[in-house]
Image (tube, rainbow, N blue to C red):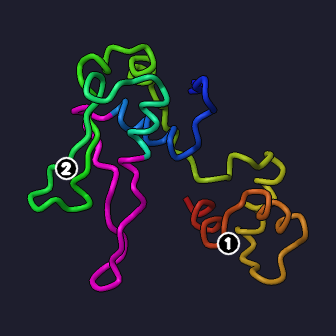
Amino acid sequence: MKISTTIKPLGIKAKRLFTELAKARNWTLHPNGYSGRGRYASKTADHAGTLALTLEELGLVKGRHFTTGNDAPRGGWSGEFVTLLPAGRRLKVITDLRHTSVVVIALPPSLALLTSSERKELDAWYISGESHPCPEEVLDAKQKSLLSWQQITHALAL
């Protein structure tokens, strides 16, 4: 589904945040957080502000369709949230996203990109036990699959 506004198309981050909010279980999203550990911890970008601006660009009104706030006990960065109100939940943009399903197929990352002949060459190379140097055809198939040697040997061992 393509999300666009009259002002400009939404960016990748805005689309991701908007989709996460539309599919959230309790219609609330806490997009801010920290990265790192200990003294090296730092705040992430202000994704709550980005999400609020995105919703306003889509025509939702703050206070009527969505609210923002902070539910952390001492007002911490990760407590910032955006919640869709019932009036915002009924909008067509939200209901369309809410009812789309995502199908996940559990395949090894990129072995599906290989043709049957390339897969046979990889299998024959793996069964032969040779490691170095590999034939040019095997190297081409490996680069086409975008997998590491360890991932290929693990996938072929299954």
Q: For the residue carrying disc 2, how many other residues have a C-alpha within 10 Å: few (<14), some (14-19), or many (20+)?
A: some
- Foreground label between 1 and 2: 2
Q: Which mark is residue 149?
A: 1
In the picture, the quarter occupied by the N terminus is: top right
Residue 71: image x %, image y %?
A: 15, 49
Q: Which segment is the magenta one?
A: 24-49
- Return the residue at label 2: 70
Magenta-drawn stretch contains 4: no
Quadrant housing residue 94: top left
From the viewer's perspective, tell me whether residue 142 is left or right of residue 103. Answer: right
- Residue 44 drawn at (x, y percent): 39, 63
- In x, y percent, where is residue 138? 83, 66
Q: Is residue 65 left or right of residue 15?
A: left
Where in the figure is residue 104, as x and y percent of width and height? 49, 37
| Quadrant in the rendering for residue 53 | top left
* Secondary element type, mark 1: helix
Q: Is residue 143 left or right of residue 79?
A: right
Task: Name the foreground residue: 65 vs 95.
Answer: 65
What amino acid is labelled 2 in the image?
Asn
Q: Secondary structure at mark 2?
A: strand
103, 140: nearer the viewer: 103
The residue positioned 59% from the left and 42% from the top of the image is 11
